[in-house]
Image: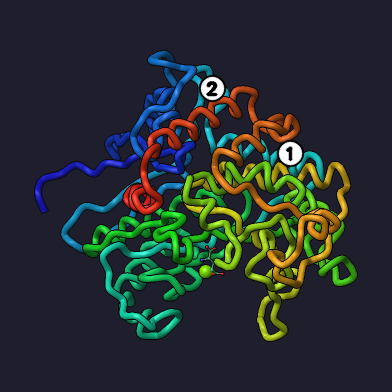
Amino acid sequence: MMNHEPLIIAVTSDFAGKVRGKAFAETEFEKRLQRGVGWTPTNVQITCFDSIADSPYGALGDLVLIPDPATLVKADFGDEAPSEQFVIGDILQTTGEAWECCTRSILKAALARLEAKAGLRLFGTFEHEFHFVDADCPLGSAYTSAGFRAQRQYAEALFAALRAAGLKPDTFMKEYGVDQYEATIGPVEGVAIADNAVTLRELVRITAERTGRTASFTPLRDPSGVGNGVHIHMSLRNSDGKPATYDPDGPHGLSVPAAQFVAGVLKYLDRIVAITAPSVVSYTRLTPHRWSAAFNNLGYRDREASVRICPMSDLSDVDEAEQYNFEFRAADAAASPYLALAAIVHAGVQGIEDQLVCPDATEQDLTLLNDDALAAKKIVRLPLTLASALDTFAGDATVKGWFPPAFAGIYAAHKHGEIGYLENKSEAEICEAYEAVY
Ligand code: GLU
Ligand code: MG
């Protein structure tokens, strides 16, 4: 190896869902935990395409990105190249308060609200789909062992890197789409759920780079194909760590607070989807018959529901109450995991505060119902475009009120900047643009 000095990059996951940061010498790690690295407010308006959207900050201001040592990852592949080291942080004002656009601080506030209002903690994990660009897995390999073998070396390197990072690698499989794979990790509590999603995405990319591949998490690669979904599995725990989601006598086995939480997520879904599925192509993925989510419906073992109650198995070694979880499917990797989870948690806590009643799970193809039949079930079609999703978000004072006061306007300006960049591009060109940046 060439002479080198090990560096660690302190990173943030921002409005574009990008992981950006600044590197420092490994020898200064302890000092940087206090001092952080400098950060610029307008960076939050850099879109996924590197254009800068309207920013209230202009060229002004200074912030600090303070690493959280619990998130430090050292990925050593045992090869010639230096280890990849990164650490996730919080963006603070120089006075020490959380910055209004720090996504990780926004999630911490949402989790604190869940604990304060309901005495509950969130337990969960993100399930990710992605594909390899320029791979050529033969036709007919969906879910096959041959499709898996085509990437066994990759998968084994990825599992080693995940485990070394302190995550619990769970499964890896050849998904249905062209060159599409899925990687899952075990659940954890609190802000670490989103930290681990960032770490997994980074390690999927890093492992790809180390092995001469390119991985993409774009929400939709091909307008006629299936998308890369992010499915967020969640359950609730009491402050003593005991599972609090399952009640065999509750609706679909949901406990009282879990049913209210799910009801809140469903009620506010059309208003938060601008945050959980925030790209232009997200809205082509969120259409019926793609195994994603097109309506704000609850499903029981149904892969076309926005919130799905996941199966439990009598055969598992894990206790039923521990297994029981629900999955949010209207998310993708254009979203910062912190913002997506914050929006879902706030919607859930609102459901608990307002003691909302959980709707029945749907058991049919909702595209066959007319508007009246949908309205009778209180089901709405999710917004059809990012622009309309942003309007739906902007139109709800309750939802905007869950975030710091400046958030809604800055977020909308960011996303409109992204939409502007894509003006006059065809659907295929837009898909290509997103595939290149995610
Ligand atoms: N690829 C689908 C999506 O866009 C999900 C398929 C599955 O259920 O795993 O969410
Ligand atoms: Mg899948």
Percent coordinates x, y for residue 93 in the rendering: 51, 21
Q: Quadrant of the N terminus?
A: bottom left
* Camera-side mark, 1 or 2: 1
Is there any visible trace of residue 46 in the rendered image?
A: yes
**What is the number of the mark on residue 113?**
1
Percent coordinates x, y for residue 190 in the rendering: 62, 49
Q: Closest to the observer: 240 or 300?
A: 300
- Counting the numbered discs, the total is 2
In the image, what residue type sits under mark 1? Arg
Residue 423 versus residue 410 in the image, above or below: below
Q: Is mark 2 within 8 Å of ligand 1?
A: no
Residue 38 versus residue 28 in the image, above or below: above
Name the image quarter holding residue 222.
bottom left
Name the image quarter holding residue 235.
bottom right
Find the distance from the CA under tag 1 to the CA under tag 2: 21 Å
* Disc 1, SS: helix
Q: Is residue 281 left or right of residue 340?
A: left
Is there any visible trace of residue 308 in the rendered image?
A: no
* Disc 2, SS: loop
Q: Is residue 290 left or right of residue 155?
A: right
Percent coordinates x, y for residue 131 in the rendering: 38, 64
Q: Residue at x 54, y 31 (%)?
A: 411
Q: Residue at x 58, y 63 (%)?
A: 292
Tell me which label, 1 or 2, sits earlier in the chain: 2
Residue 317 versus residue 356 in the image, above or below: below
Q: Closest to the observer: 282 or 312?
A: 282
Q: Closest to the observer: 175 or 127?
A: 175
Q: Which residue is mark 2?
A: 96
In the image, what residue type sits under mark 2? Gly
